[in-house]
Every structure is written in structure tokens, then in C-alpha cells.
Image (spheres, helix red, strand yellow):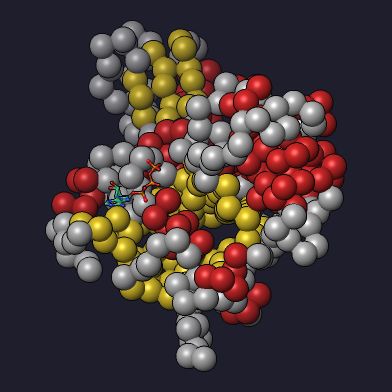
Amino acid sequence: MTDLHPAGDRAGPERALAVDVRGLVKSYSGVPAVRGIDLAIRPGEVFALLGPNGAGKTTTVEILEGYRTRDQGEVSVLGVDPGRQRSRLKSRTGVVLQSTGIDPYLTVRETIAMYASFYPHPRPADEVIQLVGLEDKRNARVRKLSGGQQRRLDVGIALVGRPELLFLDEPTTGFDPSARREAWGVIKNLAALGMTVLLTTHYMDEAQFLADRVAVIAAGRVVAEGTPEALGDPWLAATRIRYRPPADAIPPHGLTAPQGPDGYVEIIPDDPVQAVHQLTGWAIDHGVRLDGLQVIRPSLEEIYLALTGPSSPGGQAGRDRAGDQPGGTA
Ligand code: ATP
């Protein structure tokens, strides 16, 4: 077999990766949807692809599942190229799509048992029901389940065949907060079993709660990647200091700026701790008050919007700057 993964710039044993993607490109009728994505997902990781509508998440995942062809790039899923040997992957992966067609008149247990009959060594139905937290609904008909419970049943179906890798496409879209929490609990259970999980989501908080690592995708490119905590690191420098300056004293140079309409001054210092120290030291020395002093760190939501918004590297303005034209990749 051709070596799909020649020694590259990525450290670590190549074979150990559950998912290895390099330079993935996909266009629809000449319009690029995925523009050169690299991913490295380790076994046992919960990995989130986070991005706004149309970013290219589903296209990427469907290529990994073997449901879509790619135009360019190298893809290995559990050591198999899904574009060439999809049948070898089917029994080793579980797929939870955004909507599935389950017989509404079967009960939860009957549904799981029916899917179990397709596998030589299925996970016992009661174990599956417990994993997805549907013990109370074991004998309920599918049509009587709430949307969140139906989605958990979808996850259960994907678990019946004991997959090594589970694909979850937007597992909580449209859920109310309590259904989201329950779904998150289910996914945490799977992670505790050591399963590798690749999920797509629009929600920063979901990625932050569930994922060991996150790739933020915008306009077909990975614009940031790392642990949820590390994603925020480069942005800590964007910590803002706000205060209302005293009328009768001028703060030191570098710690002041023109007042906004609300009377506040806002600065973005290189070293926020040092700046607060200097500013409060100056105020004490001069016996003045710094009304409304605030130190504001950007939220993860703000970071996400900055990475994926129109003026971000992956947004429309960023693409225009990069000189990309639709149809430029085929
Ligand atoms: P969402 O969060 O809305 O599901 P996504 O990040 O999963 O979005 P994709 O569904 O991969 O994004 O879509 C990426 C781009 O490719 C979008 O511009 C979309 O309109 C386009 N696209 C997706 N599927 C097709 C298709 N079958 N034919 C033509 N264009 C498509």
C-alpha cells in the first residue's frame, strides 16, 4: 500500500493517531468549502471542531466518515483511508448525524436490540441504555421521547457496535439548557470509557466543557487549535483596563487615553498586572479616586467571535486580504 503518511513535520508516532488529516481540500462545483485542513486526533481524545455555519465542519467530518470524496489531501482514520476502504471502517466507527430515521413505534429497548442484531459482538442493550441515561424510558415508544432523549437514543445506536471512534455532528443543536447538560453528561461518560470522540459544534461553551482539544474552523481553514484553555492564551494581552479619570489630575503617560462618551478611559496595556499596579500606585500617591476601575479579560465567546467573525483571518475580509478567489482550489 502507498505510504499515505510520509515523515512530516508533526511529532509523535504516526500510527498512534486515531485521525490524521493533512492538507484536506474540498470544493463544491468549484467553490471551496475546505481549504487545506490539518488535524491530528489522538486515541481517547474528545476533539471538537468548532465553527460557525458553513465553516466546513460537516464536509470535513463526512470525508472522514467515508461519505464524501475529497479533492486533495491525506486522510487516515484508525489507520484506514476512508476514501478507499470505507467498509473496513464501518464496524469500527459510530456516526450520529443531525437527524436519523428511527421507527417511532418501537420502544427504546426494541430499537437498541434491533441494531444490536446487526453486529456479531454488540454491546448489551441494557448497558447502552444506561450509558445514554435512558433507563427510565427503556419501555417508552420512540415517538414519545423528547428531542433530547431521541438524540441520546441516536447516540446509543451508534454505541451498539462498540465503536473505537464516535462522530457526533452538533450533538445539542436546538436543545434547551437542561437537555444540553444531560447530553454533555452522556458524552463525558463515553470519554471516560476511553472512546475517541470527534464532535462538531457551534457552541464555544460546549467545546470548552467537553473537549480535550479544539480546532476552530472558519471559512474552510483551521484558524486556531489547542486545549480550550490554551486558545485563550494569546488573547490575554488583550485584557482591558477601564476607569473614570479624576477631573483634577492627569494619569501617567501610557495609562490614559481619550475619554469615551460615558466618561471612561479604556487602555489595553502590554502587561495588565504592571499597569494596574502603576495606576493604583499613582492614584494613592496623588490622593485621587479611580471611579469604576475595571480589569476586563476577553471571554472565550469574544475570542471565538474574533477568530471567526468577518474581519478575522478566516472571515470574508481575511479571505480578501489573502487573495483567495472562489474556485481557486479544485
Ligand atoms: P453547519 O454548521 O451549518 O452545519 P458546516 O461548518 O458543517 O456548517 P459545511 O456543511 O461543511 O459547513 O459547508 C461548507 C460550505 O460548503 C458551505 O458554504 C456550504 O454551503 C457548502 N456545501 C456543503 N455541502 C454542499 C453540497 N452538497 N453542495 C454544494 N455546496 C455544499
Residue 226 horizontal side relative to residue 155, left or right = left
Q: Residue furthest bottom?
A: 1
Residue at x 33%, y 44% (from the top left corner)? 54
Q: Position of residue 199 (x, y in %)?
A: 56, 48
Can residue 196 be seen in this snapshot? yes
Residue 86 horizontal side relative to residue 307, left or right = right
Residue 79 or residue 206, whichever sits in front: 79
To which quarter of the image does residue 62 belong? bottom left
The quadrant in which the C terminus is found is bottom left
Residue 8 or residue 102, whichever sits in front: 102
Establish if 4 lies above or below 123.
Answer: below
Residue 228 or residue 143, whichever sits in front: 143
Count of numbered marks: 0
Can residue 194 be seen in this snapshot? no
Q: Position of residue 269 (x, y in %)?
A: 41, 37
Residue at x 39%, y 55% (from the top left corner)? 59
Residue at x 58%, y 53% (from the top left corner)? 95
To which quarter of the image does residue 14 belong? bottom right
Residue 151 horizontal side relative to residue 55, left or right = right
Q: Position of residue 29 (x, y in %)?
A: 20, 59
Q: Residue furthest front?
A: 105
Q: Position of residue 156 (x, y in %)?
A: 70, 44
Establish if 249 lies above or below 223.
Answer: above
Establish if 326 lies above or below 203.
Answer: below
Residue at x 50%, y 27% (from the top left corner)? 174
To which quarter of the image does residue 195 belong? bottom right
